[in-house]
Amino acid sequence: MEKKKPSRQQVYTLLVQIGRKDGDGLPDGATGAALMIYASGIDEAEAVRETVAILKQADTAPLDVTGYGTLEEREAEGHEIGDEERALMQRALEENAVIVAQMTPFFDGEVPVFH
């Protein structure tokens, strides 16, 4: 039986800010949103490219992407990562997927603060 090559895929945590676009599904009155995303990729650049491409296909307007690294990198920085978040990261890895874990709309030009 042939052994499967170990995957080099990793999951990256990304914060994506999106602007408004017709058909984007954001609430009325929202000026944009922040999306917390878990995306798989060989490296962070690939995860960002795939995420932006998928968001554009979903009729959103990605404006900015901030990368927070892999699970291991985040743990090394002292981030507390709960079981639900770990499960979503594992799902992104297993499905080679981009998963939107949270969406926070902006209203009246406000910019939320993320901790």
Image (cartoon, rainbow, N blue to C red):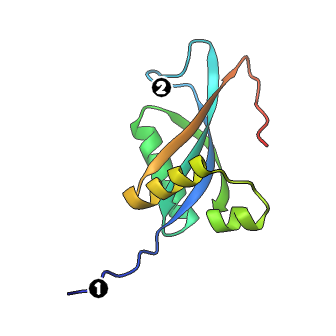
Look at the image and tell me in which quarter the C terminus lies: top right
Picture quadrant where residue 6 is located: bottom left
Numbered label attached to residue 63: none
Mark 1 or mark 2, which has the lower sequence index? 1
Element carrying mark 1: loop
Residue type beneath disc 2 = Asp
Measure how far apart labels 1 and 2 are at the Cα level.
43 Å
Give the residue at mark 2.
24
Q: Residue at x 73, y 16 (%)?
A: 108
Left or right of residue 92, residue 67 in this image: right
Residue type beneath disc 1 = Lys
Q: Residue at x 47, y 40 (%)?
A: 55
Please tell me how crowded label 1 is: few (under 14), some (14-19), or many (20+) other residues with Cα within 10 Å: few
Q: Nearer the viewer, residue 36 or 64?
A: 36
Numbered label attached to residue 3: 1
Seen from this angle, which residue lies furthest left? Answer: 1
Look at the image and tell me in which quarter the N terminus lies: bottom left
